[in-house]
Amino acid sequence: MTRHDETRFTEADLAHLGEGTVAYLREMGGEELNGKFPGLPEIAPGTKLWALFAANGQPILISDARERAIAGAFENDLTPVSIH
């Protein structure tokens, strides 16, 4: 019989997973972006933009082009990961 060790993560552990190394890339509509980026002017509903967020959910940047958002991740030494 083999024994499997269990690894348990606390909520705090999960909250910091990928911090400083991973950025999440997501296409979002203007209505979703309003309020997520401090100081961002109102974006017209239906406008699609690419948003880049740190692993902890902190907004990093928005762009009208996916490639520019990915470049922003690399410029900040982060690995971009797409989410849907």
Image (cartoon, helix red, strand yellow):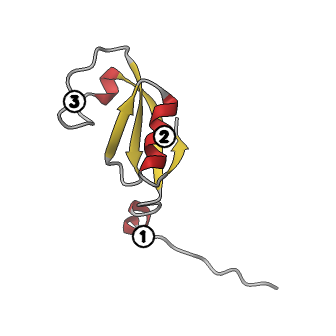
State the residue position of label 1: 10
- Tell me the distance, in whole angstroms, between the alpha carbons under discs 1 and 2: 32 Å
6 left or right, relative to 36: right
74 left or right, relative to 6: left
**What amino acid is found at the position of numbered circle 3 in the picture?**
Leu
Residue at horizontal 41%, vertical 51%? 76
Tally of numbered tags: 3
CB contact under 8 Å: marks 3 and 2 = no
Q: Quadrant of residue 3?
A: bottom right
State the residue position of label 3: 40
Secondary structure at numbered mark 2:
helix
Q: Callout 2 environment at 10 Å: few (<14), some (14 to 19), or many (20+)? A: some
* Closest to the observer, 55 or 79: 79
Residue at horizontal 26%, vertical 28%? 34
Q: Quadrant of residue 59?
A: top left
Sequence-wise first label, 3 or 1: 1
Secondary structure at numbered mark 3:
loop
